[in-house]
């Protein structure tokens, strides 16, 4: 029994077991003991994506709350909406909403919806009859809600680079890892967030903070990371380009020469191959594709100073390997690379696989080279890029037949495919050139 006059309220954190019922001793003395608890049962961490929702459940114990006011307060700041039965009761810049409680009446469950990235604190208060009585401290509980969005997207290329809302250019056959950073900066991600799409198609799994993207086809790709049902997220645009052959020259063990375009026979000119024989971008002559000569059964025909070209500058340095086949076959090259912001690769050399030109013949625009490349750090698979056609002159080394009769000074030069001019030594041991074919 209590000996008191008037109404006295005891507000403290208790459980149902502590106080199984509210008690009073007379009409002049009402003593109510209760606790209040505010939580988010489906999202105890309090992190919420933009457009996502979670329950907000006030709980009261023990017994019956006499007529009074319950008030939910928050500086929403546009970060959240609080809804009851799908109807907003706090939204935008609203700061509070009060309900009159009668006999512990609802709302027992509210819904919190994320609107924009930010952090707020929701406070639930109770005051008997809407007043704060002298000497009585009203009960309150609070929860923190952090609405999370995507702050930026980064790509790893030797280090992490911010590519949010940028356009980057990469080579077909590459693959890169992208990661999303949260807003507010440093906050945790909500469950199953973020999510990723590439050209509108989901990639990775919900909750992946990073994804590896393989670029195996040309074209423009749009990568988006978002956090929440209505979050617009952040975007990076990726242009995927394929190279073409920019130039190449030829070299070999027999000091190959460039053959004049007007030469219709088997003959080597005196012009050494110092410049690329294939250089379509050369203004003089336009679309340079010069004929070249090679000795029959040469064990060396190097495709030298081979360079590739892309239509747009590569954003990040990329190493490639080259290979070629066709009329002949070559070995894979070593490293060639596109430097930062470059459209032309560094030079590579490809050595012949086996003997070149096993029969003596002239290839008139029918000497074929099928080019391909791969990105070792990317897919590491070969990508065919072009077939080029060239005019190639084949010649065999001269054979010498000497008249071994006593006193004879005659030799014959036998050239398979062309007549070669042999130097004739002077002096008593000189010989006389008598023919050839």
Image (cartoon, grey):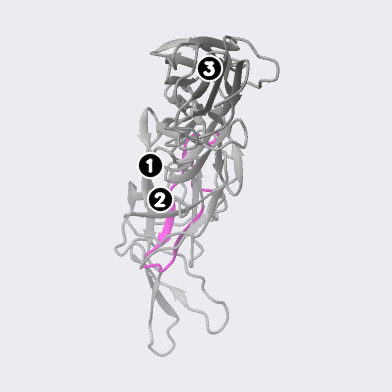
Q: Please say whether residue 388 is visible from this viewpoint.
A: no
| The residue stretch that appears in magenta | 276-305
Question: Residue 59: x percent and y percent?
Answer: 46, 26
Question: Residue 194: x percent and y percent?
Answer: 46, 34
Earlier residue among tags 1 and 2: 1
Res. 73 image quadrant: top right
Vertical position of residue 412 compared to residue 76: above or below = below
Horizontal placement of 221 versus 189: left or right?
left
Vertical position of residue 430 compared to residue 75: above or below = below
Question: Residue 433: x percent and y percent?
Answer: 44, 72
Do labels 1 and 2 touch, CB within 8 Å? Answer: yes
- Per the image, the residue denoted by label 1 is 216
Please name the residue shown 56% across and 28% down the image: 143
Vertical position of residue 151 compared to residue 138: above or below = below
Assign a secondary structure to mark 3: strand
Question: Residue 437: x percent and y percent?
Answer: 33, 65
The local crowd at label 2, few if under 14, some if 14 to 19, many if 20 or more residues have their Cα within 10 Å, is some
- Per the image, the residue denoted by label 3 is 26
Return the residue nearer the eye: 52 or 8. 8
User: Mark 3, mark 1: which one is toward the viewer?
Assistant: 3
Q: Does residue 363 belong to the magenta stretch?
A: no
Vertical position of residue 404 compared to residue 82: above or below = below
Earlier residue among tags 2 and 3: 3
* Residue at the far right in the pictured view: 134
- Per the image, the residue denoted by label 2 is 379
Assign a secondary structure to mark 1: loop
């Amino acid at each position: 029994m209590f000996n008191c006059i008037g109404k006295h309220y005891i507000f403290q954190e208790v459980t149902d077991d502590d106080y199984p019922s509210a008690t009073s001793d007379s009409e002049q003395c009402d003593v109510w003991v209760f606790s209040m608890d505010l939580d988010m049962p489906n999202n105890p961490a309090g992190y919420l994506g933009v457009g996502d929702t979670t329950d907000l459940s006030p709980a009261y114990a023990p017994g019956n709350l006499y007529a009074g006011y319950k008030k939910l307060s928050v500086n929403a700041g546009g970060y959240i909406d609080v809804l009851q039965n799908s109807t907003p009761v706090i939204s935008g810049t609203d700061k509070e909403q009060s309900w009159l409680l009668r006999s512990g009446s609802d709302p027992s469950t509210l819904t919190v919806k994320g609107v924009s990235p930010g952090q707020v604190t929701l406070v639930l208060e109770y005051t008997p009859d809407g007043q704060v009585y002298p000497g009585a401290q009203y009960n309150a509980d609070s929860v923190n809600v952090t609405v999370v969005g995507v702050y930026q997207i980064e790509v790893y290329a030797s280090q992490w680079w911010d590519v949010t809302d940028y356009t980057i250019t990469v080579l077909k056959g590459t693959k890169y890892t992208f990661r999303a950073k949260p807003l507010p900066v440093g906050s945790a991600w909500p469950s199953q967030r973020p999510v990723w799409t590439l050209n509108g198609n989901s990639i990775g799994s919900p909750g992946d903070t990073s994804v590896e993207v393989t670029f195996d086809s040309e074209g423009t790709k749009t990568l988006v990371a978002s956090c929440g049902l209505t979050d617009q997220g952040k975007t990076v645009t990726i242009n995927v380009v394929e190279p073409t052959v920019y130039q190449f020259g030829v070299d070999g063990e027999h000091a190959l020469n460039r053959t004049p375009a007007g030469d219709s026979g088997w003959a080597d000119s005196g012009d050494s191959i110092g410049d690329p024989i294939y250089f379509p971008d050369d203004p003089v002559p336009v679309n340079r594709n010069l004929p070249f000569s090679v000795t029959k059964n040469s064990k060396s025909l190097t495709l030298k100073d081979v360079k590739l070209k892309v239509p747009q500058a590569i954003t990040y340095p990329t190493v490639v390997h080259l290979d070629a086949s066709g009329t002949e076959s070559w070995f894979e090259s070593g490293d060639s690379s596109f430097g930062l912001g470059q459209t032309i690769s560094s030079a590579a050399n490809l050595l012949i696989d086996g003997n070149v030109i096993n029969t003596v013949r002239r290839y008139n625009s029918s000497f074929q080279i099928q080019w391909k490349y791969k990105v070792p750090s990317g897919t590491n698979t070969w990508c065919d890029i072009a077939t080029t056609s060239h005019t190639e002159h084949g010649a065999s080394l001269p054979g010498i037949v000497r008249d071994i009769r006593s006193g004879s000074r005659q030799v014959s030069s036998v050239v398979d495919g062309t007549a070669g001019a042999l130097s004739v030594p002077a002096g008593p041991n000189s010989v006389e050139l008598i023919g050839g074919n």
